[in-house]
Image (tube, grey):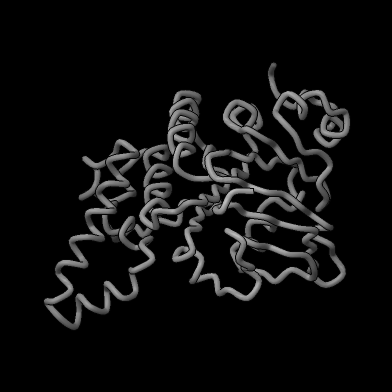
Amino acid sequence: MTAAALEVGDVSVRFGGVVALDGVSLTVDRHEIVGIIGPNGAGKTTLFNAVCRLIAPAGGTISYAGRSLLREKASRLPHLGIARTLQGLGLWPTLTVLENVIAGSPQRTRLFADMLASPASDTRAQTTEGHAMSALGELGIADRARVYPGSLPHGVQKRVVIARALTAQPSLLLLDEPASGLSSAEVEELIVLLRELRTRMGIALVEHHVDMVMAVSDRVTVLNLGRVIASGTPAEIRANTDVSTAYLGQPVAHA
């Protein structure tokens, strides 16, 4: 384990009598991509919600960089180096692309309060805007900073969402279905982007686009009915019969 690693140990989540996660364990180290796949209802997003403190596990441990997250508030996670995207876009239509990205900054509450209270916040505002523009530039969409997201193609809006997460300058990035709704060309561009981001952070990737997960991940964990049924390299997952059964006998991915 590196100093900046996520470790989930034997985590269970229950909603009333429904077991959503049942003894799930996984790790994500810095400079690796871990794909998390499984059929609908497998518990993938529930796992992210548990890591991000949006729901409380019934049992198990969750730690990051050796620090337990179980007593942390969700609002603290960006300050600890953890950023997440959601399944949907979640962009505010009345804010520009730049304003949407700034809204993802861990300092946004303080920044907006200072902007109303004192001109002394100018330096902080400029720094935050600089981080936001840098993230947009990294995603290749800095030229869209002053437009409204509703005028952009879906694939570009997806890039705005990732840029917003990057303003936290995370060492761990949790991506929830970043490839949904993307064209084949956009998926290929996303793979290139994730490989570049991997050079400076760990990435956990929940995704239904299995071929994309297999192409970009160092390791893959497969969930079914709240349990881990397989974990290994993409080649190992392709050859696993339990995984094939979970996907109704269909091939997991092209070789």
- Quadrant in which residue 118 is drawn: bottom left
Where 187 falls versus 12 (above or below)? above
Where on the picture, by quarter, is residue 193? top left
What percent of the width, then of the height, locates residue 23? 83, 57
Furthest residue in direction top, as rendered:
255
Q: Could you tell whether 189 is left or right of 22 in the image?
A: left
Marks counted in the figure total 0
User: Residue 50: x percent and y percent?
Assistant: 67, 63
Q: Position of residue 187 (x, y in %)?
A: 49, 29
For the point 49% across and 30% down, the residue is: 191
Residue located 70% across and 24% down the image: 253
Which quarter of the rendering shows the C terminus? top right
Closest to the observer, 176 or 196: 196
165 versus 103 height, above or below: above
Residue 144 horizontal/vertical position (percent): 24, 43
Q: Is 148 left or right of 154, judged from the image as shown?
A: left
Relative to 244, does residue 120 appear above or below in the rendering?
A: below
- Quadrant of the image occupied by residue 237: top right
Q: Residue at x 62, y 54 (%)?
A: 6
In the image as oriented, which residue stretches furthest toward the bottom? Answer: 117
Residue shown at 84%/64% (left/top)?
18
